[in-house]
Each structure stands twice: as C-alpha cells, then as structure tokens.
Amino acid sequence: MKLATYKDGSRDGQLVVVARDLGLAHYATGIADKLQQVLDDWGFVSPQLQDLSEQLDAGRARHAFPFEPARCMAPLPRAYQWADGSAYINHVELLRKARNAEVPESFYTDPLMYQGGSDDFIGPCDAVVLPSEAMGIDFEAELAVITGDVKMGVTPEQALEGIRLMMIANDVSLRHLVAAELAKGFGFLQSKPATAFGPVAVTLDELGAAWDHGRANLVLQSTWNGRKVGMCEAGPEMTFHFGQLIAHLARTRNVRAGSIIGSGTVSNRGLEQGGRTEWPKGYSCIAEKRCIETLQDGKPGTGFMRYGDTIRIEAKGKDGASIFGAIDQVIAAPEESGKTQ
Amino acid sequence: MKLATYKDGSRDGQLVVVARDLGLAHYATGIADKLQQVLDDWGFVSPQLQDLSEQLDAGRARHAFPFEPARCMAPLPRAYQWADGSAYINHVELLRKARNAEVPESFYTDPLMYQGGSDDFIGPCDAVVLPSEAMGIDFEAELAVITGDVKMGVTPEQALEGIRLMMIANDVSLRHLVAAELAKGFGFLQSKPATAFGPVAVTLDELGAAWDHGRANLVLQSTWNGRKVGMCEAGPEMTFHFGQLIAHLARTRNVRAGSIIGSGTVSNRGLEQGGRTEWPKGYSCIAEKRCIETLQDGKPGTGFMRYGDTIRIEAKGKDGASIFGAIDQVIAAPEESGKTQ
C-alpha cells in the first residue's frame, strides 16, 4: 500500500491512502489520522489500511478523490528520528579523490551515518527556504525507510524485518558550511538544514521484484532546472543495505517506531571510456558533479543552486512507473529578510 | 509550574502537574494528555495547567496524590529533536589539555553542538541498559531546555523567548567509541546512546532569581555509587547561554515545538592551590575526572562505570531545594544476552 499525509493546517496533517498508480487517494479517517499512529500500532492498524488500499486499487473505494502531491506534507511531517547513512561508498570515494584524500579501509565495513534533525520536514512540492545562496545549496537524492520498533543489538538480517515503509528524500545540504562544521568534530548541524521527502511512503511489496534483500533496484532520477542530471541505479552499488544501516544505528540503543533511515546520496561508479573516466548515469548531488569535473578538468565548473532553482527527484521501476511520486520543489529565500541574521 | 509524565503503558505516558515542593501531583486529564500536546499549543493549554498548578500548590487540588519519581518517564518520553551543546568551554579545554591538543580560537565564539537521537529517552529512575561494560560507560550531568517554535535566523535574544521548560539530563556516553566515531567525521552516533532526563520539566519562573538571562545559577550535584563527586555551578561559567545555543541551531532551519537543547557537561575551572591545580567542585562526567588525573598525575586512575553502578543527578537552588527532582538510575546489561551482537 501507499500512504501520504495531506496538509490540513495541523502539525501532523491527515493520513491518506493512495492508489498504486498514484491516481486516486482516500482519507484514512476512522482507521488512523496520522502516520505515526499507524507506526506505533502497525500490527493492528496496517491491515485495515491495507483493506482500504485494495478497495481503492480495485476502484471500489467510495470517497476516493484525485491524488494531488502538491497537497502533501512529508509522509511523516515530523519524526522522532532521522539518521542518514552514506551507503554508496562510491560517493565517498569520489568526494575524497577530488581532494586527494584516502578512503579509510574501515569505510568499506563500517557504515558512515549521521543523526539529522527531524522536527521540521519539508513537503515534496514545498519550497526549500534557506537563509543564503552563498552557503553552497545542494540537493541529495536518496532512498529512505521508516522502521517499526527495532531492538538494540539486532543483526542486519533481523533489522530488515523492522522496515515498514520506503520513500525518497532530498537531503538538502549547505556545502560551504560542511568543512568548517566537520572540522569541529561534532558532525553536521547547520550544514544539514531541513530535509524533504517524496509524496508517498510505500510498503515493500509495492516494489515487487525490485526489493532485493535490503536494496531497491530502482532508478533514481534527478532533474535540476528541468534538465535530467541523474539516472542513478540505487540497487547494485549500495555498499551497505538498509538492514546493515539499521543494525549500525541499533548497536547501542533501541530504535523506535517511526525512525527514518536514509541511504545517503545514490551514486554509481565511473566507467573508462576512451582513456577518460565518464559517469554516464550522472549524479544525485551537485557536489559529485563538481568532483567529477575536478578529476576530469582540474577544477569544478558547475555552481551550486540559486534561489529560484528547481529540483525534481523521482524513483522508477523497470516498467517506468513512478513508485513514490516526485519531489518537485524550488529553492527560496526567507519571506521576511528581517528574520535572518 | 512543574510538569511530569507518568508511565501508563503507552509510548508518550500521561501528563501530570507536580507541586513546587515535588510532594504532590495531579493528572492533567481534561487539559492535555501528553506534554507534546502542550508544547504544540502552548498559548492555549499552558494557562490551564498553570491554574491547576496553583491549586495544587495551594492545597486545593481535589485529586492530588503523592508524587513518585519512579513512576516517571522522561518529561518528553520521545521528542522531535534533541540537540546537545557543549556550552562549558572548560569541559572542552580540560579534555583537550589532557591529550595535549589546542582549543581552536573559534570554539570561544562558535558553539559546539551535536544532533542526538530523540526517539527513545530513559526515565529518571529507569535503568540505563547498554550492550557492553567495555565501551567506557560515562554519565554527563547537564541542564536542558524545551522550546516552542523558533524561526530560522533568530537572534540569541529572540531565541530566549522560545524557551518553554527546563530540566536536567544524563547524556550517557560511551567513551571508548568516541575517538573512532569522531574520526569518521560524521559526529556521534553509537557513542551517544539513549539519554535520560529528570522527573520534572519546569517553567523558568520556578527558577526565580536563579534564571539569569539564559543561564541558570544552580548547583548540579552528581552522586556516583553513593559518593558525591560533583557540586558544579551551572551559571557563571556557561560560555554560551541557552539563547545562543538555540540561535546556533536555528541558523539554517526552523526549530519546532518540543525541541530539546542541552547545555553539555556542566564544568567548572580548576583553581591553583599550593602550586597544584585542584577542582574543588568536582566533576559532572568521569571523562573530566580522568583528564584531571592525567594533568595531576600523568595518567587516569578512575575507571568508567560498570553494570550495577548508580548515578544520581540533581540541581539545587540557593535554598537547597531540588528544582527538577533527581535522576537516580542504575547501569544494566540487556536482559537477554541473545539480543546483542
């Protein structure tokens, strides 16, 4: 089934069930108002939503209406946890190679993951409001899962059982703040502002054969200012699968229902073509493009995002159908300049 | 007023109002069930709780009952954000000095802060369950505030207006995991397991004159295995006040209602006594004690916590009264060893 959260003026919005083809939706009223409620009591509530989902797909839901992604908040408009991995080691290799830095051997066995802010997510079609263009605004196209309760110390295999839903994310990054912030040693804070998520969160059965033991064989498309810049394969080059990422997070603590775990920027390796390395599948964040340019030409040629820029992120299966709907948003300045420092 | 959350088998517990002297409590039923509800709609709900609080303090609340901290969850059993500063620069100086490292100049003007996990907090009298004694188990005694909605780009002065409640925290740390984790560059994750909070969260008027423009002139006592090891002054040596910490967090994003911001380990400077530096006020975490020993004797003499160890943390005002009640908990192994990796 596919679930979304419609704006209704409240902080957590209103839960809707969305048809597989994303054409129609139906309020989940009477079953659950908010997605967090469903995650808190998954065993009891989700079968009722599944019934409604089947009625909707069969054209038998009585009060169905056309699904409008622009009316969506993030599926969880706020969450109790957002922990983002960096599961595509190629992304890390590329960024390090461009600055002549080594990738430590441990990075191939011990996942990178940071704790992100989760109190204020951005809806799929809402503006990404940021205080300054000078901060190096970047998108990061990712997959993410939402978990149920996962016990401290689970194995990666057990952790896979804890996955309830999957969605797509735009892990907005402020590149010019990263170096100074990481040098302080406490991780990302100001350099990782609010994150956006796609319109619908889906159960794993919606992925069909594309779900492959913790990895999703989907193509993640990124379109920047109307130009398709990334057609990245999310499955085969994911160094750590979602079960490994969740188990990493759960090593010293319980992970509770409604936790969101991200894959990090989906990234594919370059290919040798006529004595030069090319990246035919493109990129899922501008930082990678700039590293590619540095490796190819000695310096980056592509600038970061400006106010008014648009970014569209969408994941498609083998049949070309959109699984999660599209993130489709504009970068914007704060409305009243007096609010910024 | 003082607010607490009683265990009732649910994830978010049941909101109670607690008398100023922590003697009696009263369910907030009919006003609000959960503390997050109050924070979401503070202007409307908090005056009603204030009325109940005044009745309780005046001995006129009809269904009051003796307050039992052992029945408490953390005031917010789970939250949408936990961002912990390191506002006592002395703590940073001490840890760096012991390993012969410099404190960068910027640390005196730009606060250190990390994003922590907030999906699974520990109640004030609940066991701190950790997978291994070999991880270097440490407590950290801190103050923390809970905010309302705070806009991106606020000034430190404006941020002070966003503070709703204050409480105490035990920011449990796994010291032996810190170095390797920070070396990866993505901040704390496994080395900062679940955090515990004191029984009651209080509005700032409960601090009286001890609340001094973003700083709290209270003594934070830490008692480890029944021995008082810290009597630290939380006010004058706080390098960054809570308004500055919140403004730091809000530089590139909105901070939403129910966000918890921590002070970091409360720490006081050493004093020259007979040619030797002494720390008469003790320590609020074992790592500091070990650094003090390293500076005084060349090596640490105190080990970290073991299963069965107890830690009690309590903040007292000038009159010696407990403001927030006490964190009083034991370190414990997971119940079924099969659950840990």
Image (cartoon, coloured by chain):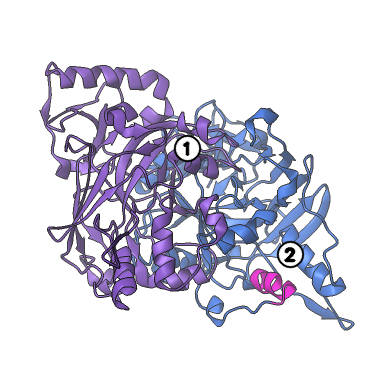
Chain colours: A blue, B purple
> What's the chain of the residue with tag 1?
B
Give the percent coordinates (x, y) of residue A55. Answer: 52, 39
Q: Please tell me the numbered disc located at residue B243.
A: 1
- Left or right: A194 with respect to B328? right
Q: Please tell me the numbered disc located at residue B291.
A: none
User: Measuring 79% from the left and 44% from the top, which residue is drawn there?
Assistant: A309
- Left or right: A198 with respect to A132? left
Residue tagged 2: A288
Q: Nearer the viewer, mark 1 or mark 2?
A: 1
Query: Label 2 amino acid?
Result: Glu
**Magenta span includes A92:** yes
Is residue A14 visible from the viewing direction of this image?
no
Q: Main secondary structure of the magenta part?
A: helix
> Which residues make up the magenta segment?
A90-100
Give the percent coordinates (x, y) of residue B272. Answer: 31, 61
Give the percent coordinates (x, y) of residue B129. Answer: 25, 61
**Magenta span includes A176:** no
The answer to which quarter of the image holds residue A289 is bottom right
Q: Residues within 10 Å of mark 1 (few under 14, many from 20)?
A: many
